Image (cartoon, rainbow, N blue to C red):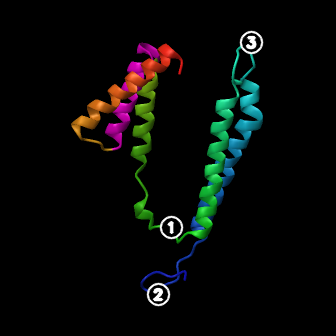
Amino acid sequence: MNGDTQGRRVSRLPQFRRALGELIVVGGASLAMIFWIIPAQTSSGGELGLSPQLVPTVCSAAIGLLTLFRFIAALVSTPAPEPGDVAPLHYAFSIIVATAAGIAGIAFWGWPIGGAILSLLVLLVLGERRPLMLAAMPVLVAVLLFLIQKTGI
């Protein structure tokens, strides 16, 4: 069952090693965030409602669980695609630059404008070229962030 169309045997070992490395690194970072970094960097103040640790802890737990699910999926899935199918590294750098520009926009012009800039840049990096989507998404993000900022949703 572990062969391709030419009958050659395809090793699952590289796929397993990659998934195991991802589980160790990302899962370990998630556990470090939950049990060490988040408790050390947040403090409970006199605010009412949810603890300041709740959202980062839930996000870190979700990342850890998704990593575990990905590891399990790698164990039961078919062999990995050819190495030529891996996305070029410039896509990751483009997303990082778009995120940095969005964060700078948030710092200088506030959440609605910075969020709109971030959404527009991410759409462009992902290859979106439809004018309606490029116009509507930043406007919707800006309106949503404005409403969150004003009403505290």
Pick the residue in front: 99 or 137. 137
Toward which corner of the image does residue 48 lie, by quadrant? top right
**Disc 1 target residue:** 80
Seen at 41% across and 22% down, the residue is 114
Mark 1 is surrounded, within 10 Å at the Cα level, by few (under 14), some (14 to 19) or many (20 or more) other residues, namely: some
Q: Answer above or below: position of 31 versus 23.
A: above
Amino acid residing under circle 1: Ala
**Residue 39 location in percent, x, y?**
76, 28
Pick the residue in front: 23 or 134. 134
Q: Answer above or below: position of 2 versus 47.
A: below
Pick the residue in front: 116 or 144. 144
**Disc 3 target residue:** 46
The stretch of residues the image draws in magenta is: 107-126
Secondary element type, mark 1? loop
Amino acid residing under circle 3: Gly
**Residue 2 location in percent, x, y?**
54, 80
Seen at 70% across and 36% down, the residue is 33
**Residue 122 location in percent, x, y?**
38, 36
